[in-house]
Image (cartoon, rainbow, N blue to C red):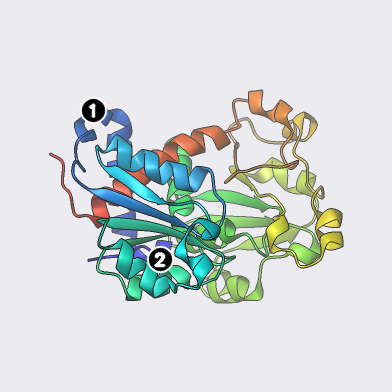
Amino acid sequence: MRHLMSPLDLSVEELNNLLDLAQDIEAHREKYSHACSGKTLATLFYEPSTRTRLSHEAAMLNLGGNTMGFSSADSSSASKGESVADTIRTVSCYADIAAMRHPKEGAPMVASANSPIPIINAGDGGHQHPTQTLTDLLTIRSLKGRLDNLTIGLCGDLKFGRTVHSLIQALVRYTGIRFVLISPEELRLPDYIRQDVLDKENVPYTEVVRLEEALPELDILYMTRVQKERFFNEDDYVRMKDFYILDKQKMKLAPEDMYVLHPLPRVNEISVEVDEDPRAAYFKQVQYGVYVRMALILTLLEIKVD
């Protein structure tokens, strides 16, 4: 039995096989429509989510399975003091696989250590968000045709952004990857990612403050929102939240074949006028997220479809 706590839980070969499966699902959805008949996915979400929770549920429903779960800690026995370990032991009596989001880093790891069913980390604090990373990789590969020899711009909250941390760790395993880190000083990439991942793997990167400076050289621009829920000080959040706004004018500086990604939800960091630009790929990302989670569920449940 396997769990998914981090993108690094999958080798590059396994990752490529998973993405191949997701693309086959996209092309032949009917073939997979009953693959998980009789199986149940539990979504255990201790903090709010729209896309991640619903895309996991949509993935299982598209596979012919069932879903159950809760959408906040207040609507679970966690509000009575039940531990994560006890919750997963209980839920495993009802479900075959579970996806967990938790505000505390490492909580899904605790669940996996106590679980007789596969656990998917659906986001833990500012740490990891592996299924979003799988979604990002599938989106990039589908749009650009490759996952190597790319210049990736990461913009916004690089300090608390778990999607950014997971994506960096996944992409450094491919050749010819270069990062442009675009953030204000207060939201720079943490030292442990810079030193233990980028420097350790000898991956080239530059750090800039101005988005306009970076745009002309990018293959992918990955925008992130400044996350209010990660700030302890309201004044700091207000000061930072509108630091970057991608609009039509700035998009003129970008190459014609550069794509804009965003894990969503967006607040102000991408103007709605950009939505009509053919390079805006963040809603395509949402659809790719369903396909990749369908592939992940099949993989963790060891279900093969001819």
Return the residue at label 1. 30
Q: For marks 1 and 2, give the CA distance.
A: 29 Å
Residue at the extreme left: 306
The image position of residue 255, as x and y in percent, is 65, 34
The image position of residue 156, as x and y in percent, is 71, 53
Residue 145 in the figure: left or right of residue 197: left
Residue 237 seen anywhere in this rendered image of the structure: yes
Name the residue: 47% across, 71% down.
Answer: 107
Q: Are marks 1 and 2 in contact (CB under 8 Å)?
A: no
- At label 2, counting other C-alpha atoms closer than 10 Å, the crowd grade (few under 14, some 14-19, many 20 or more) is many
Residue 141 seen anywhere in this rendered image of the structure: no
Looking at the image, residue 78 lies above or below residue 26 = below
Return the residue at label 2. 5
- At label 1, counting other C-alpha atoms closer than 10 Å, the crowd grade (few under 14, some 14-19, many 20 or more) is few
Residue at the extreme top: 276
Residue 199 vs residue 224, the one in the foreground: 224
Residue 130 in the figure: left or right of residue 225: left
Residue 87 vs residue 241, the one in the foreground: 87
Residue 213 vs residue 228, the one in the foreground: 228
The image position of residue 233, as x and y in percent, is 81, 66
Residue 10 vs residue 202, the one in the foreground: 10
Name the N-terminal-most of marks 1 and 2: 2
Type of amino acid under label 1: Glu
Element under disc 2: loop
Element under disc 1: helix
Name the residue: 72% across, 61% down.
Answer: 207
Residue 93 in the figure: left or right of residue 76: left
Type of amino acid under label 2: Met
Dividing the picture into quadrants, the one containing residue 44 is: bottom left
Instruction: Indicate the quadrant containing the N terminus: top left, top right, bottom left or bottom right.
Output: bottom left
